[in-house]
Every structure is written in C-alpha cells, then in structure tokens.
Amino acid sequence: MKKVILDTNFILTCVKQKIDFLNEIKFMGLEVLIPEEVLKEIRSITNSKKKLHFRENAKLALKILNKNKFKKIKFGTSNVDKGLVDFAKKNKEVIVATLDKELKEKIKKPKLVIRGKNKLEVI
C-alpha cells in the first residue's frame, strides 16, 4: 500500500478550507503517516501569539487528528522540511503532501496537493 506523509501547512490549509483530507486520502487507497515533529509544530501554533484564526485552525487540526487513526513516525531532527525530504528519498513508496513551494522543488517524486481549494490531487 502506498503511503502519504503530511506536512504541517498541508494539514492546516485543509482545515482552513474545510477539506476532509483524512477520508479523501483513505479513499485514494493511501496510508497516512504523520511525523511527530509535525504534530509538535501544530501544538506550538495553538499556544503561539499568532492571529486567533491560525490558533483555532491548529486546535481543530489536533482534534481531527486525535479522532482518527494514522501511523506516527519520527524524523529525529527538529527541521521538519529536512526530515520530510530525507524520508521521501529513503522511502520510494511515499507521497509527500505539502503546499510548500521549496519542498515541492526539492522532492522529485509524486506529491499530494490541493487543487481548486477543495480537491486533493496527486501530481
């Protein structure tokens, strides 16, 4: 089974745009992997001094993630982007879900993105 690893900005954007990303990913036949470091980033946003809507989206993302089953992984690095790139290079069957332009350029394999503000697509 192919696997998809989710980046922080992908999760938060899906929450903001009200996309049921976990069900859509499962419908695509993909297994969800979420790095511990991504969860830590989302938790830190909930306690940050960012604008209220960012904090609220992060809180909602944590609620959604806590209600669903997915596999947690650990990069062992505090730099999430570097961890994603390294993990993608080592694991051929992994699709990276990100909206980060720099990450998309660094990762030469298929990526899961949001198209048209409400649809997920592998490119």
Image (spheres, rainbow, N blue to C red):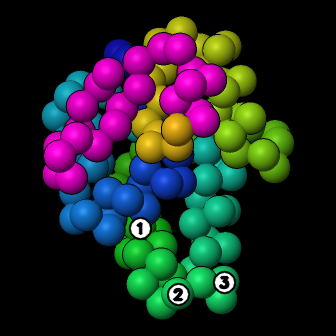
The secondary element bearing badge 3 is classed as: loop
Q: Position of residue 109 (x, y in %)?
A: 48, 14
Q: Amino acid at mark 3?
A: Ser
Q: Type of residue at label 1? A: Ala
Q: Amino acid at mark 2?
A: Lys
Which residue is disc 2 drawn over?
51
Left or right side of 81 for 39: left
Residue at 74% x, 35% y is 82
Circles 2 and 1: CB atoms closer than 8 Å = no
* Residue 47 visible in the displayed image: no
Residue labelled with disc 1: 61
Q: In terms of image quadrants, where is residue 24?
A: top left
Q: Earlier in the sequence, mark 2 or mark 1?
A: 2
Q: Give, as a single range, the part of the protein colored magenta.
A: 102-123
Mark carried by residue 48? 3
Question: What is the x, y in percent for residue 90?
Answer: 67, 13
- Mark pair 2, 1: CA separation: 16 Å
Residue at x 59% of width, y 59% of height:
39
Outermost residue toward the top in this view: 92
Residue 37 locus on image (x, y percent): 68, 52
Asked if disc 1 and disc 3 are in contact, CB closer than 8 Å, the reply is no
76 or 69: nearer the viewer: 76
- Packing grade of label 2 (10 A; few <14, some 14-19, many >=20) is few
